[in-house]
Image: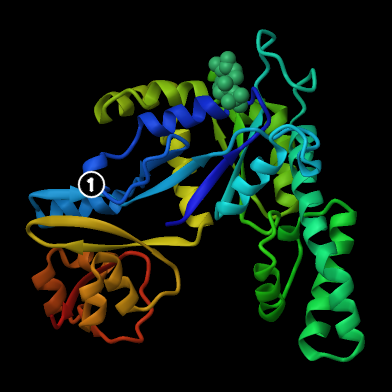
Amino acid sequence: SLTAGIVGLPNVGKSTLFNAITQAGAEAANYPFATIDPNVGIVEVPDDRLNKLTELVNPKKTVPTAFEFTDIAGIVKGASKGEGLGNQFLSHIRQVDAICQVVRCFEDENITHVSGKVDPIDDIEIINLELILADLETVNKRYQRVEKLARQKDKNAVLEYEVLSKLKTAFEEEIPARALEFNDEQWNIVKGLHLLTSKPTLYVANVKEDEVADPGINENVQKVKDYAASENAEVIVVCAKIEEEIAELDQDEKEMFLEELGIRESGLDKLIKASYSLLGLATYFTAGEQEVKAWTFRKGIKAPQAAGIIHTDFERGFIRAETVSYDDLIAAGSMAQARENGKVRLEGKDYVVQDGDVIHFRFNV
Ligand code: GDP
């Protein structure tokens, strides 16, 4: 399954945030496949649609979908040269599918900063530079061989050489791969290189307790936002300390607490949703009297593969996907009425599943 890695310099609030993640943790019973690894935290994906479907269908049980965050400790300056736990850190990053970089935006004189002062752009650049240097090494390893082949007019080599040159130039200017433009063909080559800086990335700006309701007052947050905009990345503002407290509350208490703070949605919930979509994930639903359940799929897959997420038998014996979009179902008020409205479609094996589809699979055993 796909996972988002949490990275950041020491003392920026990573562990605090990761604690909140594991405490808010999904009910293990619902996710028997879940990895038992202390560095992995499983979170349920908050989704209002699931509550609405539950009201409509009134099932015995409702099960949200979940996904994993991985805590990646140990980045230091010089990691790409193997300093500290550098190599280990880089190999852990290589294994995740997206990166959430926690950036310290809170001032607190009792908590030392590794560079002696709170400077979020400096911090971001320290980490990004290590990743860029590691990628530059990856590119350099192939560069000369591919250049030679390209000179002999090998067609694939010519294509790859173009991509490698573009990456090399960017890395030498300290620009990450994700900030570059590639066409589909080129992008396939980039993917094959398994670079660190081509992974989708978002920044988590960690602010003080009294700033969450109005992060605009924190000028560090603005700096992070400007920086992120330059590489089309998103910024989520959280106060890790508060998230840790929220994670201990039940749903009603949580809502009251958020209201007191003057915010609608917890930072962690925002982070979960943003990471989910950063990973290219979406949700379809099954809605029966026994159970209403959300399922995670990778955007772009077809109906049989989506069925296979529930059970391999569903994929093997796939016949049809009885599908209604969430909006059509809610507008109709019941499955029977949606059917009457002609909104329940019989989709075949080439149907590309959409976010929010409510599906009943028909299959042969
Ligand atoms: P890590 O080294 O990045 O994992 O950082 P920690 O999560 O251990 O946090 C370092 C210190 O900063 C701890 O003393 C935390 O209590 C404190 N801290 C983390 N997040 C916040 C926050 O949002 N506000 C304040 N005031 N302190 C925080």
In the figure, 144 relative to 252: above or below? below
Position in image of residue 84 (x %, y %): 73, 32
- Give the quarter of the figure containing the N terminus: bottom left
Position in image of residue 319 (x %, y %): 20, 85
| Colouring mode (rainbow / by chain / secondary structure / one colour) | rainbow
- Give the quarter of the figure containing the C terminus: bottom left
Closer to us: 217 or 353: 353
Q: Look at 39% across and 20% down and name the residue there.
A: 260
Q: Secondary structure at mark 1?
A: helix
* Residue matched to label 1: 30
Q: How many marks?
A: 1
Mark 1 Cα-neighbour bin, 10 Å: few <14, some 14–19, many ≥20: few
Closer to us: 43 or 316: 316
In the figure, 156 relative to 125: above or below? below
Q: Quadrant of ligand 1?
A: top right
Q: Quadrant of residue 313?
A: bottom left
Does the beta carbon of the residue at mark 1 sit less than 8 Å from ligand 1? no
Q: On the rendered structure, is 250 left or right of 177?
A: left
Q: Look at 89% across and 54% down and name the residue there.
A: 173
Closer to us: 304 or 195: 195
Q: On the rendered structure, is 125 left or right of 335?
A: right
Position in image of residue 362 (x %, y %): 16, 79
Q: Is residue 239 visible?
A: no
Q: Is residue 142 visible?
A: yes
Closer to us: 302 or 133: 133
Position in image of residue 58 (x %, y %): 9, 52
Q: Residue furthest top?
A: 110
Q: Look at 22% across and 56% down and name the residue there.
A: 293
The amino acid sitting under disc 1 is Asn
